[in-house]
């Protein structure tokens, strides 16, 4: 973001084995990755949402669930939503999920889809977007306080902003500013041996 210092993320030696392999250089111009799509459950309290402070970033598209991207027939597939985003725009995307192949640099050219809501409602949201290939973020820990009284939070569940930060880090996308408004930023970085340097 304009006016902010660039921050480089360094991974502590204990996490070095998790570092994805670098892609071999290819000829031609470097293309900007597709914008990240975040679908938020409209029932969730925005004051408790970790991702809402990032609204307005040019690399993010926010949609409310149920979003107009779902259940669109072939005839209307090319129609745009209120956000100017077509269902066909999710081709080439991967969906961050608790299960699935691990996100890696092999996904660097893919767009990211994040579903933001309580784990209690996650199954309903996942069913809508199950056609988007899942990718997991394994071996990381959340700093967000768990509040589920029904035990619906998965062991490897992350706050949405934590998942976004880790995905950008793995895919070598700029992470500057992503955690600036996250209350548990320092605890999260410490828990995962991620060092932020100026």
Image (cartoon, rainbow, N blue to C red):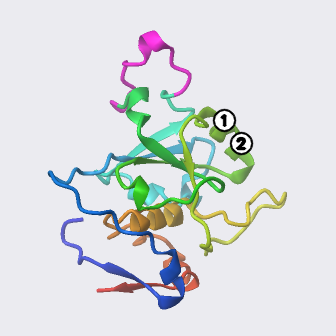
Q: Position of residue 135 (x, y in %)?
A: 55, 53
Name the foreground residue: 115 vs 106.
Answer: 106
Count of labels in the image = 2
- Circle 2 residue: 123
Q: Which mark is residue 173?
A: none
Q: Quadrant of the N terminus?
A: bottom left
Most extreme residue toward the top is 75
Magenta run includes residue 80? yes
Magenta run includes residue 114? no
Residue at 54% across, 77% down: 184
Q: Position of residue 126 (x, y in %)?
A: 64, 41
Indicate whether 12 appears above or below 146.
below
Residue at disc 2, secondary structure: helix
Q: Is residue 186 visible?
A: no
Q: Is residue 40 left or right of residue 27?
A: right
Say if mark 2 contacts mark 1, CB within 8 Å: yes
Q: Which residues are magenta?
A: 70-84
Residue at 31% across, 79% down: 8
Q: Residues within 10 Å of mark 1 (few under 14, many from 20)?
A: few
Q: Residues within 10 Å of mark 2 (few under 14, many from 20)?
A: few
Residue at 19% across, 66% down: 2
Indicate whether 76 appears above or below 117.
above
Q: CA distance from mark 2 to mark 1?
A: 6 Å
Q: Is residue 7 visible?
A: yes
Please tell me whether the stretch drawn in magenta is mainly helix, strand or loop.
loop
Residue at 34% across, 50% down: 109
Name the foreground residue: 25 vs 30.
Answer: 25
Q: Which mark is residue 127?
A: 1
């Amino acid at each position: 973001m304009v006016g902010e210092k660039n921050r480089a993320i360094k991974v502590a030696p204990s996490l070095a084995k998790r570092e994805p392999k670098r892609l071999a250089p290819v000829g031609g111009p470097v293309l900007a990755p597709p914008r990240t799509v975040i679908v938020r459950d409209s029932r969730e309290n925005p004051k408790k949402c970790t991702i809402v402070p990032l609204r307005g970033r040019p690399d993010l598209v926010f949609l409310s669930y149920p979003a107009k991207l779902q259940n669109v027939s072939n005839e209307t597939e090319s129609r745009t939503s209120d956000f100017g985003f077509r269902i066909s725009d999710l081709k080439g995307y991967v969906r961050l999920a608790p299960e699935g192949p691990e996100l890696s640099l092999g996904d660097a050219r893919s767009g990211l889809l994040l579903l933001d809501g309580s784990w209690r409602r996650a199954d309903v949201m996942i069913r809508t977007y199950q056609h988007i290939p899942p990718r997991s973020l394994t071996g990381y820990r959340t700093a967000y306080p768990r509040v589920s009284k029904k035990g619906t939070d998965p062991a490897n569940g992350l706050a949405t902003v934590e998942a976004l930060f880790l995905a950008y880090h793995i895919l070598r996308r700029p992470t500057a500013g992503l955690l600036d408004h996250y209350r548990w930023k320092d605890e999260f970085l410490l828990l995962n041996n991620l060092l932020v340097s100026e």
